[in-house]
Amino acid sequence: MLALTGLTFVASIAGSIHCAGMCGAFVLFACGSSSDSHDAVSQSKASILRSPHFLNLTYNLGRLFSYAALGALFGYFGHVIDLTGSAFHIQKLAIFLAGGFMIFFGLIAILRIKGVHIKHLAPPAFLIKTVTAAQRASLSFHPTSRALVIGLSAVLLPCGWLYYFAIAAAGTASPFLGAIVMSAFWLGTVPYLAAIGFGTQQFKKFLGNKASLITASLIIVLGLSMILRGFVIDTAAFADMEHQHETPAASNNRQNVIDQINKANTSDLPCCFDGSE
């Protein structure tokens, strides 16, 4: 689990440039403080709540809550998939499916980077309508409330990058662990999105055009690590299941064979006597 969380965090940092393209405008909108009051006293009292730092914090906390909730939801879906697989004697089905999808999407991303034309899936219309309605409603809110609403609605954006890691959360087959994975994803996106809120974009200059290839490669590595983890868990579970279902007679026979082998190793075999005794 630690390896999955760590890889998610690293991939999220590398791919946060993608987040800038999807969420950059929303960050600027969330962190922009309107000056609707001309009362110097009221402006002084509200200066902290209207500061870009506080609005940035509020926006990102809203994203954290919504991402963790999404991870918990997908973790529950993964648990249901595992239960379904167990009914057909397939152990840890969710982690194998999630790993396979991660590898598939990573390969698709690399092919697109290399110039192969692969059609993008259109996002569901209801998601676009919901996000648009939330943005319009937040125009009349206090800057702090506006930043929170925009952060909470970020999970509804049609972002394939976000849902790659939601699939990874499903692979945990646990609402709690799914929330942890998505929290690690959120943490990796914070530095770059916060930098946008403060008006700096140094990370993009550091990675440049290599960012997309790096992130796609990390997605594949993450998928492979999930499948490997699934095999380790499945092998351990199979060995434990064999041990639990072993009958007392089988256990005694196995022990007798071991005793006979040990006895043979400490005594001379009949073929080794020279007949002089």
Image (spheres, helix red, strand yellow):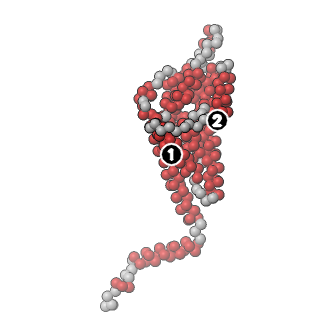
Q: Which residue is mark 1?
A: 103
Residue 77 locus on image (x, y percent): 64, 46
In the structure shown, which secondary structural element does the residue marked by tag 2 occupy?
Answer: loop
Q: Is residue 201 left or right of residue 93?
A: left
Q: Position of residue 148 (x, y in %)?
A: 63, 26
Quarter-of-image position of residue 165: top right
Considering only vertical position in the picture, is 1 above or below 251? above
- In this view, which residue lies farthest toward the front? 117
Q: Secondary structure at mark 1?
A: helix
Q: Nearer the viewer, mark 2 or mark 1?
A: 2
Res. 9 in view: no
Q: Earlier in the sequence, mark 2 or mark 1?
A: 1
Label drawn at residue 75: none
User: Could you tell me which residue is drawn at 61 percent across and 24 percent down?
Assistant: 147
Residue 129, x across and y down, in percent:
67, 29
Q: Residue at x 64, y 54 (%)?
A: 84
User: At 44% across and 25% down in the image, what residue appears?
Assistant: 202
Q: Do tag 2 and tag 1 residues touch (Cβ < 8 Å)?
A: no
Q: Is residue 47 visible?
A: yes
Tell me the amino acid under the disc marked 2.
Answer: Pro
Indicate the position of residue 30 as horizontal and vertical percent values: 59, 23
Mark 2 burial class by Cα count in 10 Å: few <14, some 14-19, many 20+: few
Between 129 and 25, the one lying in front of the other is: 129
Q: Residues within 10 Å of mark 1 (few under 14, many from 20)?
A: many
Q: Amino acid at mark 1?
A: Ile
The residue nearer to you, when weighing 121 against 10, is: 121
Q: Nearer the viewer, residue 145 or 91?
A: 91
The residue singled out by tag 2 in the image is 124
- Dividing the picture into quadrants, the one containing residue 268 is bottom left
